[in-house]
Amino acid sequence: MDDATFELMEAIKQVTGLSLTAEKTYLLESRLSDIMSDYSLSDFRELSRKFKNDPDEEFKEKVIDRVTTHETRFFRDESIFSALLERIIPEILERKRGKNPSIRIWSAACSTGQEPYSIAISIHERYPHLFKDVRILATDIAKETIEKARSGIYSTFEIGRGLTDSHLKKYFDPIGGGLYRVSEEIRSITEFKQHNLISDPYPDNFDVILCRNVSYYFDHQERKNLFNKIEKALNQDSFMILGSAESISEYSKSFIIREFGLCRFYELNPSNFTLFIKGA
Ligand SMILES: C[S@@+](CC[C@H](N)C(=O)[O-])C[C@H]1O[C@@H](n2cnc3c(N)ncnc32)[C@H](O)[C@@H]1O
């Protein structure tokens, strides 16, 4: 890897946490080529200098949007939705019995919004009486991505990735041109914000935090920091859900590992040692 590529990867890592290696050079080249020609930048050195020093926030936002991977779909990893509806929410309700019944969920690194909307739809289906007590905060580092999520507008292709016909009919309004918008009711419990998991202060007081398919882009220390900050953002009796290829075992001892069907999820553990409870 040449010095200019290394300099750019370091600059990106500092801002986003994204840990890139030499074999990802082609990815940077393909994702950043049109930005480089739009801004008449001749190489990665010029690009990284502009990224680090230029007060033009719009340029920085565009680079972040391009270098981050936004792959997602509705109801990605179905087993987490069963765990959420059949195990996590009932336990939260049980623990909150007699107290304020509201449930606060954070979908961190939510990409274009399919994850928080899938959560809202599944809660509406399973617990219609509870729906109005649920609040979902959905965040992502990438500006254009979070704006798309907030719009709630999806193409037929995106709809085809994970949604059933009955979900489409019930929870989306056709708006022409092959596009659909998430219904007002589903959007009403979901709030979208731009948020950087590496450098922004964390919101808190959550009953469930989903942070799926982002920690594997971070290095060891950033993962440790991430899980530490997530822990502080959670209520006392609360849960965390990661992507199926992610784990906290090496980074934190503050959670009990739980399983429900094919889903592994994490319960905040006040006694502070890692326990593995299968199917519990
Ligand atoms: C692969 S998507 C995962 C989307 C969704 N959670 C899912 O599992 O389907 C990863 C997302 O993480 C976001 N991301 C990357 N670095 C981030 C950071 N430092 N802070 C917040 N979000 C970040 C990216 O913009 C991208 O949208």
Image: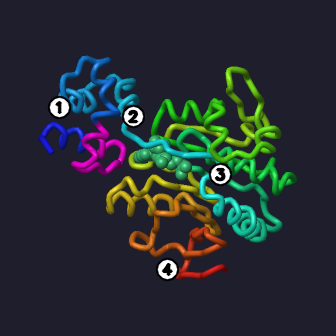
Q: Whole-Å distance between the Cαs marked 4 and 2?
A: 37 Å
Q: Secondary structure at mark 2?
A: helix
* Earlier sequence position, callout 3 versus callout 2: 2
Answer with left or right where residue 35 lies relative to residue 196: left
* Earlier sequence position, callout 3 versus callout 4: 3
Residue range highlighted in magenta: 12-28
User: Mark 2 belongs to which amino acid?
Assistant: Arg
Mark 4 vs mark 2: in front: 2
Give the image quarter of residue 26. Answer: top left
- Give residue 103's position: percent from left, percent from top: 72, 56
Crowding near pointer 1: few (<14 within 10 Å), some, many (20+)? some
CB-based contact (under 8 Å), mark 3 and mark 2: no
- Label ID, residue 45: 1
Residue at which label 3 appears: 75
Q: Give yes or no for residue 197 being in the magenta stretch.
A: no
* Earlier sequence position, callout 1 versus callout 2: 1
Query: Which residue sits at x=42%, y=34%?
Result: 65
Cβ at disc 1 under 8 Å from ligand 1: no
- Label ID, residue 274: 4
